[in-house]
Image (cartoon, rainbow, N blue to C red):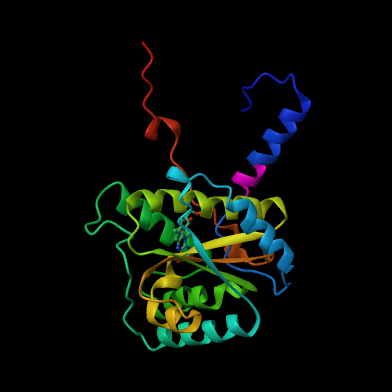
């Protein structure tokens, strides 16, 4: 529903374009092999760097991985996954103790994706195979790994999220899709070795970038969102 007064055509077009960029972003889990112009990657990162950050400290650092470097990283991550190597996160992403309503949302998302792929409860092999697609970057030709100096505080994580969202939204503006991936930092030693990342950095997450494979059913997955009354409290009088 469009509730704004439509007096200014160019403002309206801008709003439609921004809305489309935001709402057409989705975690894309099948990409075409089509390469991405390196100049476009630079432009996206330049745009994303316009994100706000407290006192403009800009805590983000990005590794862009393509070509043979991408293939080598993928091979080692996939091998670790297939050998059931223990995952080692450098920070706690999820609640330590899952509870309602988050556990239900998590389950709905997991089972929604698996259901679409005809993966049934108990088929651990198929689940592991699908999880392993993370380490093939869902076939995306471009991978990013994000790091931050490890003495930054909680506020910098807030700043970081804005930077990441900017990349994903800007990517939509030029026909690209993305998948943000915490999975890409679940074997930090492998990532650190490949990208020569020192101990004074923390691995934040990764992101796959490329052109969507629209023929793959996995990309039809659309997890639902809360309605306004579930997350907004109005204070009026
Ligand atoms: C920081 C972050 C890490 C994520 N990590 C993964 C991941 O490792 N693998 C994956 O398939 N999806 C990952 N996701 C995608 C979420 O599952 C997805 O954003 C959520 O289900 C909502 O779906 P949508 O992005 O398509 O709107 C991640 C999302 C975020 C924001």
The quarter holding residue 108 reads bottom left
Residue 70 visible in rendering:
yes
Magenta-drawn segment: 20-24
- Residue at the image position 66 percent from the left and 43 percent from the top: 20
User: Does the magenta segment cover residue 21?
Assistant: yes
The residue furthest left is: 97
The residue furthest top is: 237
**Residue 223's spot in the image, x, y percent?**
49, 51
**Compared with residue 13, is residue 83 higher up or lower down, i.e. above or below?**
below
The quarter holding residue 103 reads bottom left
- Residue at the image position 39 percent from the left and 77 percent from the top: 188
Q: Nearer the viewer, residue 188 or 230?
A: 188
| Image quadrant containing the N terminus | top right
User: Does the magenta segment cover residue 42?
Assistant: no
**Compared with residue 223, is residue 75 higher up or lower down, i.e. above or below?**
below
**Residue 130's spot in the image, x, y percent?**
48, 74
**Residue 13's spot in the image, x, y percent?**
74, 33
The residue furthest right is: 9
Q: Nearer the viewer, residue 221 or 69?
A: 69
Q: Nearer the viewer, residue 83 or 191?
A: 191
**Residue 232's spot in the image, x, y percent?**
39, 30
Most common SS among magenta residues? helix
- Residue at the image position 43 percent from the left and 56 percent from the top: 109
| Image quadrant containing the C terminus | top left
């Amino acid at each position: 529903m469009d509730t704004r007064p439509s007096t200014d055509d160019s403002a309206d077009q801008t709003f439609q374009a921004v809305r489309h960029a935001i709402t057409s972003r989705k975690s894309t889990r099948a990409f075409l092999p089509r390469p991405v112009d390196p100049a476009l990657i630079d432009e996206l990162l330049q745009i994303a760097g316009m994100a706000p950050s407290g006192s403009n400290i800009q805590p983000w650092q990005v590794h862009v991985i393509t070509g043979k470097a991408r293939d080598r990283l993928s091979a080692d991550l996939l091998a670790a996954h297939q050998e059931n190597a223990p995952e080692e996160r450098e920070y706690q992403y999820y609640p330590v103790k899952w509870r309602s309503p988050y556990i239900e949302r998590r389950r709905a998302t997991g089972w929604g994706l698996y259901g679409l792929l005809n993966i049934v409860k108990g088929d651990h092999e198929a689940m592991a195979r699908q999880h392993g697609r993370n380490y093939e970057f869902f076939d995306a030709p471009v991978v990013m790994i994000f790091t931050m100096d490890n003495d930054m505080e909680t506020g910098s994580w807030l700043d970081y999220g804005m930077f990441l969202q900017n990349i994903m939204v800007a990517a939509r503006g030029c026909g690209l899709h993305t998948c943000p991936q915490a999975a890409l930092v679940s074997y930090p030693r492998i990532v650190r070795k490949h990208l020569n990342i020192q101990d004074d950095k923390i691995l934040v997450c990764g992101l796959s970038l490329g052109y969507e494979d629209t023929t793959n059913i996995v990309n039809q997955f659309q997890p639902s969102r809360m309605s306004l009354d579930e997350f907004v409290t109005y204070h009026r009088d």
